[in-house]
Image (cartoon, helix red, strand yellow):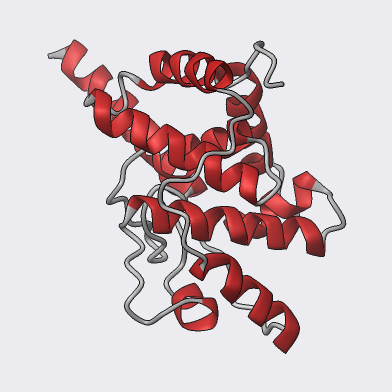
């Protein structure tokens, strides 16, 4: 009985920690030129594209990341498709794919259908107002590729606003600008769990 109570408390603490860090980007008016650029970024189609420089780079990176993600996304095919999407969309937005994996770990715990208390959706916990602001009203934020594309585009936008300051950009992404918990959690996941020692040429 005591063991059950201990596990219940642990799970409650984990849930509370994850819930506190789930996404809640805040609506901010955008200049027309910025809105147009972000809209182009999320609407561009590239379903079979790859950002890897070589097949060897692709195999090595996917193998390394797949092993670490195995306990979160069990199905091998789904896991590889997810990792390819993360790598492509992150690279396309000028982001480190391992950083994006760290962010997803903290935001949703790799749950495709995660919904935060503020209504953020999917792997990268994108707020629905973004579909009206820069996307299409029928954009499905639970679609893997669409969610990752929106998330990477939004993080790139925040990095640009903050002149490359990742700490502040992550705070904006999470809706917790000025508070250290979220940026530190993402940085810890990025550097401790998703660090890649291979060399992508």
Q: Is residue 35 above or below residue 52?
A: below
Query: Percent from the top left, x then y, of residue 22?
Result: 47, 50
Classify residue 94 as left or right of residue 77.
Answer: right
Which corner quadrant of the image does residue 174 belong to? bottom right
Observer able to see residue 31: no
Query: Percent from the top left, x then y, of residue 133?
Result: 53, 81
Residue name at image x 25 percent, y 20 percent: 7
Which corner quadrant of the image does residue 83 belong to? top left
Which corner quadrant of the image does residue 13 belong to? top left
Classify residue 55 as left or right of residue 117.
Answer: right
Residue name at image x 48 percent, y 17 percent: 59
Query: Percent from the top left, x then y, of residue 17?
Result: 45, 38
Q: Residue at the far left: name it.
A: 1
Residue name at image x 52 percent, y 62 percent: 24
Observer able to see residue 90: yes
Query: Percent from the top left, x then y, of residue 189?
Result: 58, 27
| Front one among 6 and 111 | 111
Tell me the quarter of the image containing the C terminus: top right
């Amino acid at each position: 009985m005591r063991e059950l109570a201990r596990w219940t408390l642990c799970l409650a603490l984990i849930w509370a920690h994850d819930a506190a860090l789930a996404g809640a980007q805040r609506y901010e008016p955008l200049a027309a030129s910025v809105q147009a650029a972000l809209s182009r970024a999320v609407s561009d189609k590239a379903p079979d594209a790859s950002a890897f420089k070589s097949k060897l780079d692709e195999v090595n990176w996917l193998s390394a990341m797949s092993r670490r993600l195995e306990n979160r996304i069990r199905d091998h095919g789904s896991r590889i498709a997810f990792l390819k999407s993360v790598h492509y969309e992150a690279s396309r937005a000028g982001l480190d794919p391992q950083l994006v994996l760290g962010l997803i770990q903290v935001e949703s715990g790799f749950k495709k259908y995660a919904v935060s208390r503020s209504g953020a959706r999917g792997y990268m916990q994108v707020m629905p107002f973004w579909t009206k602001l820069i996307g299409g009203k029928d954009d499905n934020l639970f679609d893997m590729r669409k969610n990752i594309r929106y998330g990477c585009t939004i993080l790139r936008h925040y990095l640009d606003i903050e002149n490359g300051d990742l700490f502040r950009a992550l705070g904006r992404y999470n809706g917790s600008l000025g508070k250290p918990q979220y940026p530190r959690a993402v940085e810890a996941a990025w550097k401790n769990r998703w660090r890649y020692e291979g060399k992508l040429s």
